[in-house]
Structures are given as structure tokens and as C-alpha cells.
Amino acid sequence: MSITTDPIWVTDERPAPIACQAWCAYGDGHPNQLTALDQSCFGQEHLLPLSLEPLVNHNAPSDPEVDFRPEHLTLYLVKDYGREPAIHLDKGEATGVSMTPAEALALAQRLLTLASLLTTQPEHRPEPDVPGYCTCGTLTRLCVGQR
Ligand SMILES: [Zn+2]
Ligand SMILES: [Zn+2]
């Protein structure tokens, strides 16, 4: 007598493929996941190295060799089962945050505002070519930046 049933891992019923999001990096409906809960769509990852953060060892803790590289942010779109599509942001291997499009836009606006405070602040020193004037464009005696 021969065994006619397939092993359980072959006959185990998989969920039907889903309609992937247009931006899904897989795009195949995730047919090989064990449950519908695992059928998440993921967009392309965008990596952003962080130069101000401490370097991170990318080797396993048990590895005597170390491989220090810059920490980074990872941004991607995600659509989990039963949830709205979201923008996800991770820092390195740590658990990150999911944002609605409105929240991501609000974050982007705040980042632009804060970054512009650091990058567009005028320098305040005597203008070498125009005596009596500050490099910010006002009279040196009236400039608050030089006091
Ligand atoms: Zn997908
Ligand atoms: Zn000034």
C-alpha cells in the first residue's frame, strides 16, 4: 500500500492571492503566504544614512569581527491586511512608525521648516566689501545678530 496523500506542507491551503497595491514591490498577490494576515504589500525601500548618529555594527553580536556602518532611516509604503495604506519609517533595526499621508505631509512640512531655520539663517559679520554693513544686509550698528 502506498501513501497517496501529499505531505501537509504541500496540501496546506494558502489564501487566495490579493490585488496588490500599484506600488507593491512584489506585485504577485503574495500567493505563498501562510495566512491572509501575512499578505502585506511593501513598496520600494528608501534608505537615508544618518551622519549624526553613532555607527552601528552590522555583524551578529556573536561575530568577533565588527562591521561598523552609518545608522540609517528606511522609508517605505506598506498595506497590511484590513488596514489603510501607510508610510512607514524605521530607524535601523528598531521598530518604527506608520503614518497616514496627511501625517507624513505634516512631518515633511515641519522638517522643511526646521531645516530651513538651520540652513537659511544669515551670517552676521562685517560685510568686507561694504563698510558699515553686516553680511545679513543691515547696518552693522542696527544688526541684532552681531550683538
Ligand atoms: Zn503586494
Ligand atoms: Zn547681521
Image (cartoon, rainbow, N blue to C red):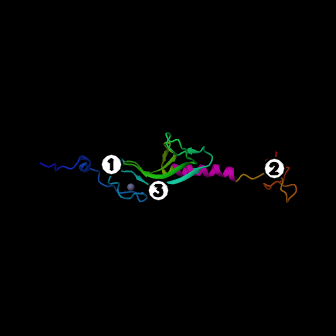
Residue 22 inside the magenta-drawn segment: no
Name the residue beneath numbered marker 2. Answer: 143
Secondary structure category for the residue under label 2: loop
Report if the beta carbon of the residue with label 2 is closer than 8 angstroms to ligand 2: yes
Tell which residue pokes out farthest to the left in this image.
Answer: 1
Instruction: Say few, some or many: other residues with alpha carbon within 10 Å of mark 2 (under 14 / 14 to 19 / 20 or more).
Output: some
Decide which of tag 1 and tag 2 comes sooner along the chain.
Answer: 1
Q: Say if the magenta span includes residue 105.
A: yes
- Provide the secondary structure element on which disc 1 rests: helix
Residue 73 lies, in percent from the top left, at 54, 49
Which is in the foreground here, disc 1 or disc 2?
1
Mark 1 packing: few (<14 Cα in 10 Å), some, or many (20+)?
Answer: some
Element at label 3: loop
Q: Name the residue under label 1.
A: 36
Residue position marked by numbered label 3 in the rendering: 44
User: Whole-percent x and y of residue 118?
Assistant: 68, 50
11 and 25: which is toward the camera = 11
C-alpha gap between disc 3 and disc 2: 48 Å
User: Which residue is rendered at x = 35% and y = 46% of the image?
Assistant: 37
**80 sits to left or right of 55:** left
**Residue 98, percent from left and from top:** 48, 46
Under mark 2, the amino acid is Cys
- Which region of the structure is painted magenta? 103-119
Q: Earlier in the sequence, mark 3 or mark 2?
A: 3
